[in-house]
Structure formats: structure tokens, C-alpha cells
Image: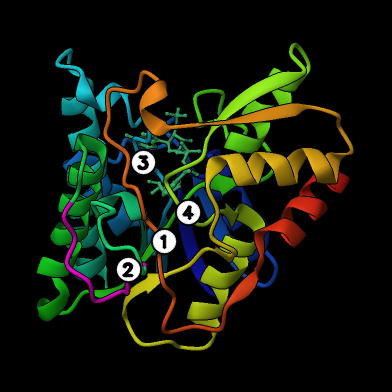
Amino acid sequence: MAKILILGAKGNLGQQLVKVFSPGNEVIAWDRGEIDITDRELILKKMADLRPELVINAAAYNAVDKCEADDGEYELAKKINIDGPKFLAEACRLGGATLIHYSTNYVFDGEKKGGYQETDQPKPANRYGKSKHHGEKRILELSGSGLKWYLIRTSKLFGPRAESEMAKQSFFDLMLELSRKQDRLEAVDEELSCFAYTPDLARATKELVDKNSGYGIYHITNSGACTWYEAALELFKLAGLNIKVLPIAGDRLIRPAKRPKYAVLLNTKRPPIRDYREALKEYLKKM
Ligand SMILES: NC(=O)c1ccc[n+]([C@@H]2O[C@H](COP(=O)([O-])OP(=O)(O)OC[C@H]3O[C@@H](n4cnc5c(N)ncnc54)[C@H](OP(=O)(O)O)[C@@H]3O)[C@@H](O)[C@H]2O)c1
């Protein structure tokens, strides 16, 4: 039985991590109410008191477009996505705990058509990607001085709705919500990347730990790269809904943040995870 601290525990991924890691372990599930990950002193103190063996950080600032405005949002994103992992990494190194942190395919600019391997050099195309990339760097910097760490890059999460009301809404939930009001929808037929079903991602995270996989960077998503348009067609087909979906170009939507065109994360280190369509079928059945 291990003592495991999960941060961002009320978020989309966090709540699935709590479910998957709880059997057989002592799981401490904290969200914003219990700790602010941008408060260094608080983190150092609370972690020293708790002494977890494993810390899983699913807390993040995820509002990709809001980061582009100069109204203080980007400053907040930097605090949560850069300072947060930095302070957690410091505390883990001091206490000897292993740290698992999540990052995104948006650390890449999407100009490489064949997809990105774990070893590819990040080059973010927007501010959100930049903040997550700097968060990655804060962890890597402590790698040589005793920090035990896993960095998992993922993309396009979907799954059971998060407990936290502020948590990011998934593309599929948004499409289903819109389809209740309209029978014709538009979806971007660009920005090729992979979905990640949060229960699958949580299980894959646990497998990394259980199998004592080497510390380092991992790319974990479901299989089956697709555009938003292709995913919307699959969704309505699987849900048995007669909704007309029209393909549009990315620049037809007003979105302040630039999106990578080809941001497929290639997983070269772990067994592949099932196709997102299978996971989506399961999600729709459970809804
Ligand atoms: N969602 C995606 O499509 C996606 C894609 C690629 C990568 N990722 C990465 O995957 C990870 C999980 O994302 P997610 O979608 O599950 O996130 P999420 O649903 O937005 O949940 C994040 C959680 O972190 C909490 N949080 C925010 N700021 C905090 C702070 N300062 N201190 C403590 N807790 C704080 C949030 O609380 P509040 O709700 O109260 O703010 C929320 O419960 C993140 O690292 C994210 O960058 C996500």
C-alpha cells in the first residue's frame, strides 16, 4: 500500500486518477480547496507533513484562448503551469517522492506531419503551449539532482464530467450539448491529433508506475488520429443522432490562440491504447 497524493483531484483527469489509484493504496485527493499549487511555502509544508511516496499532478490552467489576452490570465496560467510543477518537483525531491506531471501536444508547433516522438524538441505555437513547455523544463531541470519523475504528454481529453465546474468541457460534450439545439453543426477539418479517454489515461498512468517503467517523458493518448470534423461524424454515428456536420477550415473560427496543424503524439515507449472510437462507445453507453 502506497501513500499517494493526487492534485487537481476534482478535474477531468484527476477524478479518474483517484478512482484508479484508490484500490489498495492510501490516496489523498486534493483540489484547489485543499492546496494552491502556486503557493511554494504551503506546498513544502503540507508535503513535508504528509510525506507521500507518489505525487500525481493533474492540476493545470487549460483555457487555451484566454491565455492570449493581456488581462492577467496569462500571468495566472504561468503561475499554475510553470510555478506549480516547479514547487511540486522541489517538494518531491526533498521528500523522496516520485512526481507524475501531465503536459500537452500543444508544446509542439504542429508543422511535422508524421507526428511527434517523446524525444522531439518542443516549439510551442501559442501561450498555453509555452506555459506547459516551461513547466516541463522546471521538472527536467531537477532530473539530474535526484528527482524521480514521469512527464506524460497527452491531448484532447474526454470522459466523465469533472466535479469541478470550472474544469474544461470536452469536445464531445460540447458537440452533444450543441446538438440538442441544432441539427446542423460545423467542425474544423484540420488539426490532426489524438483523443485521450480519461479512464484509459488514468489506467495507463498506473501501469507506468506498476511496471516500474523508467523515469522520463511518455506520450499517452488513445489510438486513431483524427480531425475535429472526423471525430464529430464518429460521435453522432455512435450516438445514433441524425446531425449534419459540415467541415470547415480552422481559420473560420475566431480563436485567439494558434492551433498546431499536425499535433499527433507518437507513443514509442508503451503498448498502444485502444482506438478512441471504442472508448467513445463505452463513454456514450455509460452517460
Ligand atoms: N483537457 C484537455 O483536453 C487536455 C489536453 C492536453 C493536456 N491536458 C493536460 O492534462 C492535465 C489534466 O487536465 P484536465 O483537463 O483534467 O484539467 P481540468 O479538468 O481543468 O482540472 C484541473 C483541476 O486543477 C485545479 N486547479 C487549478 N488551479 C489550481 C491551483 N492553483 N491549485 C490547485 N488546484 C488547481 C482545478 O480547480 P478549479 O476547477 O477550481 O480551477 C481543476 O479541478 C493537465 O495537465 C492538462 O494541461 C489536458
How far is the residue under mark 1 from the one under mark 3? 21 Å
Q: Residue at x 31, y 55 (%)?
A: 47
Main SS category, magenta section: loop
Residue 47 is left or right of residue 3, and the answer is left
Element assignment for label 2: loop
Q: Report the residue marked by disc 3.
A: 60
Please determine whether, in this image, residue 30 is positioned above or below residue 208.
Answer: above
In this orientation, does residue 177 appear?
A: yes
Picture coordinates of residue 82 (x, y %)?
A: 19, 45
Residue 5 is left or right of residue 125, and the answer is right
State which region is magenta.
Answer: 115-123
Q: Report the residue marked by disc 4.
A: 6
Mark 3 lies within 8 Å of ligand 1 (Cβ measured): yes
Screen quadrant of the N terminus: bottom right
Residue type at mark 3 is: Ala
Residue type at mark 4 is: Ile
Badge 4: residue crowd in 10 Å (few <14, some 14–19, many ≥20)? many
Mark nearest the camera among 4 and 2 is: 2
How far is the residue under mark 4 from the one under mark 2? 28 Å
Residue type at mark 2 is: Tyr
Residue 7 is left or right of residue 201, and the answer is left
How far is the residue under mark 3 from the one under mark 2? 22 Å
Mark nearest the camera among 1 and 3 is: 1
Please determine whether, in this image, residue 142 is positioned above or below residue 59.
Answer: below
Element assignment for label 4: strand
Picture coordinates of residue 31 (x, y %)?
A: 46, 38
Q: Report the residue marked by disc 2.
A: 116
Please determine whether, in this image, residue 151 is positioned above or below residue 82.
Answer: below
Q: Quadrant of ligand 1?
A: top left
Q: Which of the pair 120/2 is nearer the observer?
A: 120
Residue type at mark 1 is: Val
